[in-house]
Amino acid sequence: MADIYVSKPFVRKEEKQEENVSLDEKEDLTKKKGPIPFRERKSLDFNPIASFAFLPKEVDFETKNRDEKIVLLLRRHPITNLRWIFLAILMSLAPLLLAKFPIIDFLPSNFRFVAILGWYMITLAFVFENFLSWFFNVNIVTDERIVDIDFVNLIYKEISDADIDKIQDVTVKVGGVAQTMFNYGDVYIQTASEKPRFEFLSIPKPEDVAKILQELRDEEKREELEGRVN
């Protein structure tokens, strides 16, 4: 399994001077400097329909601050779409199956054509609505906060966020054969913000998401101790 923490190498000027240093000395230097902050890591190429994107390049959202860097962009695991995709296939095949049973034969041929066309338009609308719901319902983790975007329809959506330092507890829940086999589950985030609980549901690699959140919390604490401000 690919390690999500592996990215294109980020090399500091100081690190270029340490190429001939022994391994023990390198470990000591790493401990002193600490891990590279997320905002200093290089962004990676982004697949627009990915359900798990680590440090995605050229991704933006409405409330994003200018110096804010997106660390994770999450959607529900693609396998969760199988239910409505299967139903859409059945709906598209329904007119062919009903052709064997003369249910609407009493209608004139023109009306039958309109009825079938209307059914396929309903099917297309069903597919379009479910795809938009999956595509635009996203959870975002930046170097400063977590953001939950709930897309209801084309004219209504709800955006909630909480600062990283307001996170109090992170719980990972993976249950069932499908979630275990395909490595997806739920991440529940307890915060001290106006919205006390964030739910990242059916997302891929939930354990890795929890680890990244913990790393961001540790990074935030180090910045507070060092008196650095984002």
Image (tube, rainbow, N blue to C red):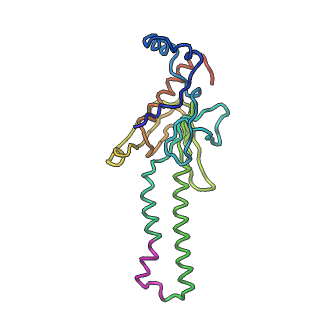
At 50% across and 31% down in the image, what residue appears? 167
x, y (%) of residue 16?
56, 17
Q: Which residues are drawn in magenta? A: 93-105
x, y (%) of residue 188?
44, 39
The quadrant of the rendering that contains the C terminus is: top right
x, y (%) of residue 79?
42, 52
From what the image shows, is residue 195 above or below residue 154?
Answer: above
Q: Is residue 187 among what the camera can see?
A: yes
200 or 48, which is in the foreground?
48
From what the image shows, is residue 112 above or below residue 68?
Answer: below
Q: Looking at the image, which residue sits at the far front?
A: 20
13 or 110, which is in the foreground?
13
Q: Looking at the image, which residue sits at the far left?
A: 177
176 or 116, which is in the foreground?
116
At 43% across and 33% down in the image, what residue appears? 3
Going by the image, does 4 lie left or right of 57?
A: left
At 34% across and 45% down in the image, what residue appears? 181
At 54% across and 66% down in the image, what residue appears? 124
31 or 224, which is in the foreground?
31
Going by the image, does 196 lie left or right of 180?
A: right
Residue 100 within the segment the image draws in magenta: yes
Residue 1 within the segment the image draws in magenta: no
x, y (%) of residue 166?
53, 30
Going by the image, does 194 lie left or right of 182?
A: right
| Mark count | 0
The quadrant of the rendering that contains the N terminus is: top left
Q: Is residue 194 among what the camera can see?
A: no
Q: Could you say which quadrant of the image residue 208 lies in?
A: top left
From what the image shows, is residue 24 above or below residue 44?
Answer: above
